[in-house]
Amino acid sequence: MDKFVIDGPTPLHGSVSVHGAKNAVLPLMAAALLARGKSVIENVPDLRDVGTMVKMLDLLGAVTTSNEGVLTIDTTHADGIEAPYELVRTMRASIYVLAPTLAVHGRARVSMPGGCAWGPRPIDLHLMAMEKLGAKVELSHGYIEASCDRLRGGEVNFPISSVGATAQTIMAASLADGTSVIRNAALEPEITDLIDALIECGVEIEGRDTSRVVVHGTTSVKPLRHRVIPDRIEAETFAAAAAVTGGDITITDCDPSHMGAVFAVLERAGCTIEVGPNRARVRGPKRMHATDIVTREYPGFPTDMQAQIIAALCTANGVSTVKETIYPDRFTHVPELRRFGADIRLDGNLAVIRGVPTLGGAPVMATDIRASSGLILAAMAAQGRTEILRVYHIDRGYQRIESKLNALGARIERVSQ
């Protein structure tokens, strides 16, 4: 297991580019299973989670090749129906193969998912949607067993908005017999990206960028040829890095229209932000102002930026609050931030952050992808040396983040243990 050794404080300056979105590419890779032939996905980030999904596709019989961010998935002989525990336990997004496997073969056997340890993240909405589209679903010995003669169009009403369940349902409905209506569909850009890709493949879909999506099922889907959208969470993490270090960073190859909620919070905290086509410049203040935040579904403040913003607010002037409404117990990073000297109190799903003048370097441990990036931000703002253990988490969601930050002036060394 590698670790990061970080010497701070280090104000960050310069330009940094953003890779393709992790949360967009994973369902797109699964969607390639809907077609027969070679799908090509461009702007694919080099991430541990992408590698895990490649292994999953290989097990299902697809042949994958990758070259400089271009992933080719040949599904000509992809006849497998089982996603085993050994892979699914390492990444929750592996469940995305359920819908396309079921839709194409009439059967799917997928292990119950694993991945990040924090919080209950039930899959009941995924299973409910498959049943609404005509599948028989059973849970047996830790596996989801789903079957159907052919999926049929139906109405799926989600009680809460779910990105994963929305993507799953759209994929299933693409090959269903008839029309499906999905209500309370997720609005995240990654869902829009999946819809755009499937439309390019010949699926008729209405309701792009709305909470009511109508999918007209077809008998065959053409192979994908699609470029993944930029990773808004990676871009927002760099923006928070500029804020907490008092830096000046220009983020390129991004889509500022996807980052309005985070930019609004950073501006309230004292940052100056200038946006242009595919870029944003973020200048941090000498010391951030305290502010209050509530995580919401898109277009609200994303839960995937909660750890990073808490880290940034640890040295803000005043008392901030962050209320987590998506995953109420997603606070495993808080005890680690306290090791830096942060003053954070938890009250249920509310974090109260009393800003301190400075943080001090400390040994800490990463617990998930976004917690890892939050610890990196704190370390770059802290006085002295920090060691972050278990950084394999960060590799699941960020491509060579230490190289990008070092190019901006950070002092981060990856050490193999």
Image (spheres, helix red, strand yellow):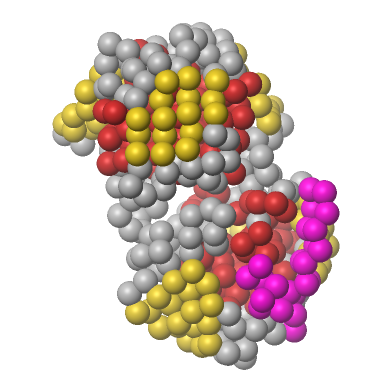
Residue drawn at 34 percent across, 25 percent down: 154
The foreground one among 184 and 58 is 184
Q: Which range is magenta?
A: 264-286
Q: Viewed as shown, does residue 218 lie left or right of 121?
A: right
**Which residue does the image show at 35% across and 79% down from the upper left?**
347
Displayed quadrant of residue 79? top left
Does any portion of residue 23 appear in the rendered image?
no
Q: Which residue occupies the foreground of this view, 276 or 214?
A: 214
Q: Is residue 124 left or right of residue 180?
A: left
Residue at x-position 68% and y-position 64%: 263
Q: Is residue 252 above or below residue 62?
A: below
* Left or right, 172 with reference to 198: left
Check if residue 275 falls in the magenta segment.
Answer: yes
Looking at this rendering, what residue extends furthest in the left direction?
A: 141
Q: Note whether residue 307 is visible.
A: yes
Q: Nearer the viewer, residue 182 or 19?
A: 182
| Number of marks present in the image shown | 0
In the rendered view, tell whether residue 365 sits above or below residue 75: below
Q: Is residue 342 left or right of residue 267?
A: left
Q: Position of residue 176 (x, y in %)?
A: 39, 17
Q: Could you say where residue 180 lies in the image, as x and y percent from the top left? A: 41, 25
Place of residue 3 in the rendered image (x, y in percent of width and height, measured from the top left): 54, 61
Tell me which corner region of the image, top left, top right, bottom left or bottom right, holds residue 326: bottom left
Q: Is residue 200 magenta?
A: no
For the point 82% across and 49% down, the residue is 277
277 versus 132 height, above or below: below
The correct choice, above or below, for 110 with respect to 235 in the image is above
Quadrant for residue 288, please give it: bottom right
Residue 67 place in picture, x, y as percent? 69, 27
